[in-house]
Image (cartoon, rainbow, N blue to C red):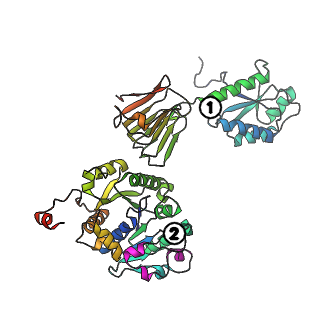
Amino acid sequence: MAKIIVVTSGKGGVGKTTSSAAIGTGIAMRGFKTVIIDFDIGLRNLDLIMGCERRVVYDFVNVINGEANLKQAMIKDKRIDTLFILPASQTRDKDALSKEGVERILNELAQEFDYIICDSPAGIESGAMMALYFADEAVVVTNPEVSSVRDSDRILGMLSSKSRRAEQGLPGIKEHLLLTRYNPERVIKGEMLSVEDVGEILAIKLLGVIPESQAVLNASNSGTPVILDEDSDAGQAYLDTVARLLGEEVPFRFLNVEKKGLLKRIFGG
Amino acid sequence: MSDHSFELKGSLFPLSVLYCQDLSAAAVKTQLQQKLAQAPAFFYRAPVVINVESVTQAPDFAAIAEVFKELELVLVGVCGASAELKKVAQAAGLAALQLSKSKTPAKETKEIEAKTEAAAVAPVMETKVVEQNIRSGQQIYAKGADLVIRGTVGAGAEVIADGNIHIYGTLRGKAIAGAAGDNQKRVFCHKLEAELISIAGSYWLSDSLQGEYWGKSACIGLQDDKLVLADLL
């Protein structure tokens, strides 16, 4: 049975799509058959981050409406052959998703895939609710600042009350905290919340800490999930994150300010 | 020697007596339903006697008995029945009880109503226990009960109780105790970082809560209409 993981946050712009792409790619790199679904109907982005925007013919809404089948709509990744993307519709809005339609498609995907990653839109409206409703696990993407933390808290409340698992009285969704855009220097200066602060407020298990990194923007612009940039700190942090998501024990990195070496000090880092 | 394993003794029990001008099954049903809606638990399987003093024509006791059964009441019998009505009631399987004293029905009705209301307003204070964190945007209301939270109340979350509120984690959101107006109720929390605390309508915002107890355990109560913070222990 496939595991359904929703990547969500409440707040926009915190790195949901970047994280969905990186985590989905990372899981697929381990050999699991993985599909990433873009639930952000009307604001399609995942295809850009994954670098497959020119191959989108049919989308999620087409499949729900029966205008295309899954095989036609899914895009196979060119780099990893166990990875597929189901893009969102750019011309419709989030009301185009129905619970029955989404359930039917997830059931169909579950026959074939090991992992289904749902890239949630921002907000707490129907689109975000649809993305999290069927989830088994949730990756709550949070930036180390108060508004993002509060919105994550709100989404955690939704996960425990508005999901299928909650409504049917099943064991709750497994919640993971993914802290993104973490900048240890600014934490020391008191300009950012620390890992401990966020962990204390949200009180869920920390899955990963992704440092603020130029590599993320570069990766987005080139349509390559940042996890494939294995030399970058962000790429390595996502690799650690995926390992933890799959149940491995990996120590946390990039939590402290890196001491600049002599050469770096001379030539600039 | 008397045998104690079998005895048939008389005893007195309080019974609810129904006074109803119109004893058609439909009318009895509507009236009873209204009454039961006020305090369903109080009347569950309650024994009831129908006063038929003012009745001239024999009601359809079988139909009324059905109504009682449906509403989960136990129809015991009738009281104040004429000799003729007694026979009809007994034929329908009901006991014909004797009225001890002739009280005016109106007074009796009032008394019963008063009792019912008292029962509905001041039930035993129960406790609602929530075994998880209360997240931003969530609202928990413990109606007519104390509220115990085994977790943290997040910023933007609200916990409300007619009774006391106990929070074993951090209180970052709003806590409203004594929501029904009882000014003796209190809020207890393990770590005070609340947005708002209110007891019986008096409230403090986080600005007024800063100080000695901020970030520490505390107990907040009302004294002379003023909120007072105190050590939890």
Q: Secondary structure at mark 1?
A: helix
- Mark 2 residue type: Val
| Chain letter, disc 1 residue | B
Vertical order, A49 against A162 (above or below) = below
Same chain under badges 2 and 1? The reply is no
The quadrant of the picture occupied by the C terminus of chain B is top left
Residue bounds of the magenta highlight: A39-65
Q: Which tag is nearer the camera, tag 2 or tag 1?
A: 2
- Label 1 crowd (10 A; few <14 / some 14-19 / many >=20): some
Closer to the camera in the image, A25 or B54: A25
**Which of the labelled discs sits on residue A102, or is there none?**
2
Q: Position of residue A79 (x, y in %)?
A: 32, 80
- Label 2 crowd (10 A; few <14 / some 14-19 / many >=20): many
Could you say which quadrant of the image residue B220 lies in?
top left
The quadrant of the picture occupied by the N terminus of chain B is top right
- Mark 1 residue type: Ala
User: Magenta stretch: residue A45 in it?
Assistant: yes
Number of marks in the image? 2
Q: Secondary structure at mark 2?
A: helix
Q: Position of residue B157 (x, y in %)?
A: 46, 45
Could you say which quadrant of the image residue A186 lies in?
bottom left
**Which of the labelled discs sits on residue B134, or is there none?**
none
Query: CA separation, marks 2 and 1?
Result: 46 Å
Residue at 80% in and 39% down: B27
Q: Position of residue B69 (x, y in %)?
A: 70, 41
Closer to the camera in the image, A155 or B142: A155
Q: Which residue is mark 1?
A: B120
| Chain letter, disc 2 residue | A
Closer to the camera in the image, A7 or B104: A7
